[in-house]
Image (cartoon, rainbow, N blue to C red):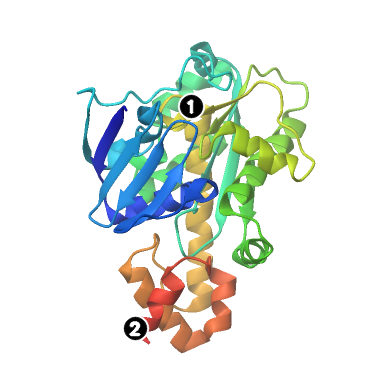
Amino acid sequence: MPQNVYVLPLETINKMKLSYTDSLTATPPGAVFRAKTSHAVITAYKSGKVLFQGSSPETEAVKWSAEGSGTSNAHKKPKPAAKPFSKFAPPKKLFNENHIGSDEAGTGDYFGPITVAAVYVEQQQIDTLKRLGVKDSKALTDPVIRQLSKEIIKQNIAYSLLVLHNEKYNNLQRGGWTQGKMKAMLHHHAISKLLQKIENKPWDGIIIDQFCEPAVYNRHIASEKESLTEKTYFLTKAESYSIAVAAGSIIARTSFLNEMDKLSDQTGITLPKGASKKVDKTIAEVITVKGDAFLNKIAKTHFANTKKARLYL
């Protein structure tokens, strides 16, 4: 059976667990989680070792391989590209045509909301955005991201931005919504709003930075009586290929950073990003100063960090 093995940081493994929320299965001894998709079974261990096994393990491994070291029984690193046989894989020519791209920020962070931005880029704007330095926001510092966001907006680039604030996030989560469903609905609504905004302008396709299987995405939006827009494609690490997705990731990240600043001001404590031990200690500080109930306004309270913070009280 084909397999890929990687050693990844615990922070990445925690992000993976959130990403695979809708695919989790029974966790074996010594593991952080196990998930099963149509491509592979992913098992992440406390040691940092992550095993991808199945018919197409590289399809899942490529989403995370850049964040660690690894090996493959095929003696090759997986290539970060969508499977050509998938009807949801975007045609390569789309990256150089008029298209919409959407991406999100804040999903793996304990504090702060989830933000999603959908961006419409016309063919003649692509080179300008590349010259400005628009690329995957994960490869940029926060100050650069904020500056690029301003530059993108100056180019009269059409976009739609949605923010799912923490109180609503927690209410949805307690009502049975997974984070995956929340993200799917945010992407869907951001794209729908953008299509209304650009009206009759031509577009050749829509690219969503893939965070779950297309079939799962479809089930999520169908459960709210919504349907997939025509010519919608999914691609892992899409911001590395599509300038529209890259612009979306920058705008979404900037919005998340701005929201984090607001929440820090409201709290009177600088709130750290991510879901590390530093976050656990900050939660304890917030509880001491503001009380448990205040977390509902600033955090994703179902994260394991809430329980871990009790050690510091």
Quadrant position of the C terminus in the picture? bottom left
In contact (CB < 8 Å): disc 1 and disc 2: no
Classify 179 as above or below 276. above
Quadrant position of the N terminus in the picture? top left
Q: From this viewpoint, which residue is outermost toward the top?
A: 93
* Helix, strand or loop at mark 1: helix
Can you identify the residue that label 1 sits on?
Answer: 243
* Helix, strand or loop at mark 2: helix
Q: Position of residue 54 (x, y in %)?
A: 38, 31
Q: Looking at the picture, which amino acid does disc 1 mark?
A: Ile
- Say whether residue 24 is left or right of residue 308: right
Q: Looking at the picture, which amino acid does disc 2 mark?
A: Tyr
- Say whether residue 169 is left or right of residue 27: right
Query: Is label 1 or label 2 in front?
Result: 2
**Distance from label 1 to label 2 (Cα)?**
44 Å
Can you identify the residue that label 2 sits on?
Answer: 312
Nearer to us in this view, 169 or 24: 24
Nearer to us in this view, 185 or 175: 175
Residue 220 position by quadrant: top right
Which residue is depicted at the point 55% across and 48% down?
22
Tag 2 or tag 1, which sits nearer the N-term? 1
The mark tally for this picture is 2
Q: Position of residue 102 (x, y in %)?
A: 57, 35
Q: Label 1: few (<14), some or many (≥20) within 10 Å?
A: many
Q: Position of residue 92 (x, y in %)?
A: 49, 13
Q: From this viewpoint, which residue is outermost toward the right?
A: 225
Which residue is depicted at the point 54% across and 15% down?
94
- Say whether residue 94 is left or right of residue 67: right
Q: Label 2: few (<14), some or many (≥20) within 10 Å?
A: few
Which residue is depicted at the point 47% across and 79% down?
268
Classify 189 as above or below 57. below
